[in-house]
């Protein structure tokens, strides 16, 4: 059905793609201005509308850099209830700054986290608030061309590679496939852990990285679940029935992971970046009660957890056994060291250039 619908939508994709192509040519030709800053700026983004696993890659960079440099993240703050530039503080919530920035702020309190729709204006505000900042990570800024990052990282989903997709509304791309040429490094995310050398070679040919581009492959590595609230369950009991309740673009990898150790796994899906209501919590309880067995637990993601925290009192009242499953990225084919050196080399070069008289 979607295949036939995509044919009908294709003319609109051509029109939208043309508008974006003109916009990009204006930036490339200098008729629209991109601002550069005299410190290392790394952008992590994608060509598609979401679900590529961008957030764990930003966190990878945070962990990689934060012990050597004073790191700041700058995001748009998608679906937050506020506007303009905001610096995350002790009283910030997901509704103030967005779920992904709140996740960064909670996990890495020693890192500066801020949000702002107009990132070209937000960077000077950030540097005014935190002049000691040495590296800025731009979250989801591949199409935000008013800033020219020093390093542009583009993430594409293994199962939904940009090379096989189309511009919205016929597909999921925010711009034409040729946009990948702006990337300095391309990361194929959510790969099977046992991705073969043969398939790696085939994907490399398909993507066709240019001489100036690096290509990496990563997979998701799930950690140990932890309780959403301090009084929650300490672990998922063996043989327990699991209700996966989450609002992310692609919950399938999470469900598949849990099916490796639990036979009774059910999904209760919500829209991406969804803010839960009390009725949603009641729905979770109904779905949980309907599962078989005496041991039951609800599993959610870290991104959902910061939104669910807004309803902590109601979760306690309903006694929902909510657990959070963290996830990180792991580089395949022994490429972690190469990637780390690639990032450190850029940061050192850009830092030296920025401090030169």
Image: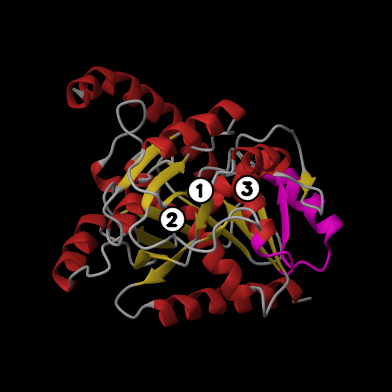
- Give the Cα separation between the discs numbered 3 and 1: 25 Å
Q: Mark 2 or 3, which is nearer the eye? A: 3
Pointer 2 local density, CA inside 10 Å: few below 14, some 14–19, many at least 20: many
Rendered image quadrant of residue 128: bottom right
Pointer 1 local density, CA inside 10 Å: few below 14, some 14–19, many at least 20: many
Q: Could you say which is closer to the camera, residue 7 or residue 109?
A: 109
Q: What residue sits right under mark 2 in the picture? A: 154
The residue located at (61%, 34%) in the rendering is: 79
Q: What residue sits right under mark 1 in the picture? A: 142
Boundaries of the magenta span: 107-134
For the C terminus, give its image quadrant: bottom right
Rendered image quadrant of residue 232: bottom right
For the N terminus, give its image quadrant: top left
Q: Could you say which is closer to the camera, residue 196 or residue 186?
A: 196
Q: Which mark is residue 306?
A: 3
Rendered image quadrant of residue 3: top left
Q: Secondary structure at mark 3?
A: helix
- Measuring from the top left, give residue 317's x and y in whole percent: 65, 38
The residue located at (85%, 56%) in the rendering is: 129
């Amino acid at each position: 059905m979607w295949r036939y619908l995509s044919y009908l939508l294709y003319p609109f994709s051509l029109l939208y793609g043309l508008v974006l192509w003109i916009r990009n040519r204006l930036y490339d030709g200098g008729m629209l201005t991109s601002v550069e800053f005299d410190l290392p700026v790394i952008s992590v983004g994608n060509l598609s509308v979401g679900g590529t696993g961008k957030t764990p890659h930003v966190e990878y960079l945070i962990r990689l850099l934060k012990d050597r440099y004073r790191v700041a993240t700058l995001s748009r703050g998608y679906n937050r209830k506020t506007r303009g530039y905001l610096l995350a503080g002790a009283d910030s919530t997901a509704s103030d700054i967005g779920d992904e920035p709140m996740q960064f702020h909670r996990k890495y309190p020693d890192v500066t986290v801020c949000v702002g729709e107009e990132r070209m204006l937000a960077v000077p505000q950030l540097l005014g608030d935190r002049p000691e900042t040495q590296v800025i990570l731009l979250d989801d800024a591949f199409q935000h061309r008013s800033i020219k990052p020093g390093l542009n990282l583009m993430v594409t989903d293994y199962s939904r590679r940009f090379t096989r997709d189309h511009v919205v509304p016929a597909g999921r791309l925010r711009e034409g496939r040729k946009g990948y040429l702006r990337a300095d490094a391309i990361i194929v995310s959510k790969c099977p852990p046992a991705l073969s050398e043969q398939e790696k070679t085939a994907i490399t040919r398909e993507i066709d990285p240019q001489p100036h581009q690096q290509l990496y492959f990563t997979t998701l590595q799930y950690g140990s679940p932890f309780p959403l609230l301090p009084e929650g369950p300490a672990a998922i009991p063996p043989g327990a029935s699991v209700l996966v309740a989450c609002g992310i673009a692609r919950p399938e990898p999470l469900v598949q992971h849990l099916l490796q150790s639990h036979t009774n796994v059910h999904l209760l899906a919500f829209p991406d970046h969804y803010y839960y209501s009390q009725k949603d919590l009641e729905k979770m309880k109904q779905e949980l009660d309907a599962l078989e067995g005496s041991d039951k637990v609800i599993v959610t993601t870290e991104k959902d957890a910061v939104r669910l925290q807004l309803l902590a009192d109601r979760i306690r009242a309903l006694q929902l056994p909510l657990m959070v499953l963290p996830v990180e990225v792991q580089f395949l084919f022994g490429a972690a060291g190469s990637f780390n050196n690639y990032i450190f080399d850029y940061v050192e070069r850009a830092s030296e250039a920025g401090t030169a008289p």
